[in-house]
Amino acid sequence: MTDLPSSILFVCSENALRSPMAEALTKHRFGTTVFVDSAGIRDGELDPMASAVMDEIGVDLSRHKSKRLDDLMDTSFEIIVTLSPEAQHKAIELTRVTASEVEYWPTPDPSVAEGHREARLAAYRDLRDYLIKRIEVRFAAAE
């Protein structure tokens, strides 16, 4: 069992869907015990379906402002969790000169789901629930 990290950064491709959800879920779970942030490799706008499925469980994403990894003033996080292959490559490159631990959580992109609105929302719910479980398994055991 390891100690709960002091800081976690979630990184995905656009900071519009996966990483903001992971950030918000981690903050919801741990409050201010851990410093949590998220970023993307490219610019993006918050996905409204991500907001909708987070609202269902009482987690508000409305104040999230997407940001790029290159724009962060400080990248010295204890753990960087990458959620897309592109983010994984960038994080490995970034951490060659830092002591950050990088973890890759292969995470599906629900924005590519097809079908009617309810079918698409189901893909977003699946992502949300997957992230909840990953966060719980990885970090709750460290409490």
Image (cartoon, rainbow, N blue to C red):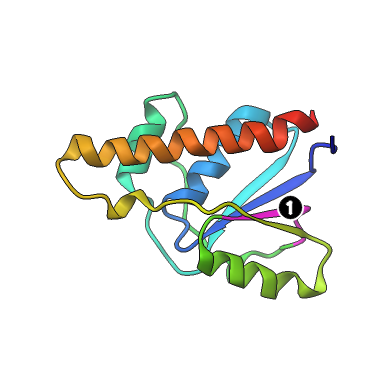
Task: Please say if 112 is above or below 118.
Answer: below
- State the residue at coordinates (49%, 37%): 130
Image x and y of residue 92, in percent: 68, 70
Image x and y of residue 46, in percent: 38, 51
Residue underneath mark 1: 79
Task: Please indicate, yes or no, whether residue 68 appears anywhere in the rendered image.
Answer: no
In the orientation shown, which residue stands out farthest toward the left?
A: 116
Task: Please indicate, yes or no, whether residue 140 appears anywhere in the rendered image.
Answer: yes
Relative to 26, 97 lies left or right: right
Q: Nearer the viewer, residue 62 or 49?
A: 49
- State the residue at coordinates (77%, 60%): 76
Quadrant that contains the C terminus: top right
Image x and y of residue 105, in percent: 58, 51
| Quadrant of residue 82 within the rendered picture | bottom right
Amino acid type, label 1 = Ile
Residue density around tag 1, few if under 14, some if 14–19, many if 20 or more, within 10 Å: some
Relative to 76, 39 lies left or right: left
Q: Which contiguous range is marked in magenta?
A: 76-82
| Quadrant of residue 52 within the rendered picture | top left
- State the residue at coordinates (37%, 57%): 45
- State the residue at coordinates (18%, 39%): 117
Question: Does the magenta segment cover residue 77?
Answer: yes
Relative to 78, 18 lies left or right: left
**Is label 1 in a helix, a strand or a loop?**
strand
Task: Please say if 28 is above or below 64.
Answer: above
